[in-house]
Amino acid sequence: MNRIFSGVQPTGNLHLGNYLGAIRNWVRLQKEFECIFCVVDMHAITVWQEPAALTASTREVAAAMIASGVDPKANIIFNQSQVSAHAELAWVFNCVARLGWLNRMTQFKEKAGKNRENASVGLYAYPNLMAADILLYKATHVPVGEDQKQHIELARDIAQKFNNDFKTELFPVPEPLILGAATRVMSLRDGTKKMSKSDPSEYSRIAMTDGPDEIAKKIRKAKTDPEPLPTDREGMTGRPEAANLIGIYAALSDSDVEDVVKKYGGEQFSTFKQHLADLAVSSLGPIGEEMKRLMADPGYVDSVLRDGAERARAIAEPIMREVHDVVGFLRP
Ligand code: AMP
Ligand code: TRP
């Protein structure tokens, strides 16, 4: 049986990269798979979060999922900390994963920066918790943006080592699903940097709650080079900003990069940006509006998360019992 698991951290500033790299693909996958979507608040606290902001961001991410078209009845939407088995399985995986494996994780190196000694232990063990998220439900497929590929590979290694060490076939080896024309959306200010929640410049990203004027303004101000648009895929080489805007257009219009360069090749950026802004406003505008409406009704969002957590627990509990038996933990 196939089962999808994916997560987004409630760390504020949800953006177009989160939408195109992850959430938008989930909306399609819900038709084919049993899906579990998680607001990973326990991952968020690996770096400092103001408690009130964490609560608000948790609701915001849930609202983004629902507003984008994820059906909370047909799927499970919940926040990680409501299902304590995530932490429990993560501990077992802390004892399966090797230090050498974690030492290779590029996201830790980026996030910890120069002052590694001062990074939280949680930030270092982050990928083990992520493996627990996925394997707690025996998920087979994990739709994410390009930046999470290395973490999924680690989850695969953990599943295999656990199965090997304990001579079991308890865990499936999960597959990443990296889909669409914009699996790595770049900053609008610098085409060599990933669009990220933590970039100090608001103009580097389009927020999922930005209104039409903000979206249009950010696209108009997006960095480009002085040449007209390239006429083929090869022409995008060495032009990261052009490649990024073309990729965003392709993803938002459900077409390929080839189609976009065929249509706009040789045009000036000013024309293309106008069309891209119209497209972005028409796709994101209604989602942002719906998110705001949902965030004004926290009672409803909380009830979705509570109901999701209950259903998630029902799947996780028997799997956790299997883990206890395999590991040799005595249980009542
Ligand atoms: P995060 O905000 O780090 O929790 O990421 C949530 C999801 O969005 C993950 O699947 C990421 O891979 C995806 N994502 C984050 N930033 C980007 C980006 N700039 N481009 C594409 N996908 C992204
Ligand atoms: N680490 C992911 C990110 O920052 C979020 C995440 C946590 C996740 N657990 C997961 C994604 C499990 C997929 C599956 O983007």
Image (cartoon, helix red, strand yellow):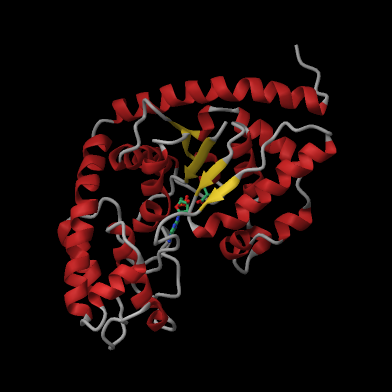
**Residue 295 screen position, x and y as percent:** 27, 37
Quadrant where the N terminus sits is: top right
Q: Position of residue 116 (x, y in %)?
A: 66, 63
Residue located 40% across and 61% down the image: 182
Q: Is residue 270 left or right of residue 33?
A: left
Q: Position of residue 126 (x, y in %)?
A: 62, 48
Q: Is residue 100 left or right of residue 110?
A: right
Across and down, in percent, residue 17 comes to 39, 58
140 or 218: nearer the eye? 140
Residue lying furthest top:
332
Quadrant position of residue 215: bottom left
268 to the left or right of 35? left
Give the position of the C terminus as an image quadrant. Answer: top right
Q: Residue at x 52, y 38 (%)?
A: 5
Where residue 2 sits, quadrant-wise, is top right
Count numbered badges in the picture. Answer: 0
Determine if residue 117 is in view. Answer: yes
The answer, for residue 13, to whether it is visible in the render is no
Q: Residue at x 60, y 25 (%)?
A: 316
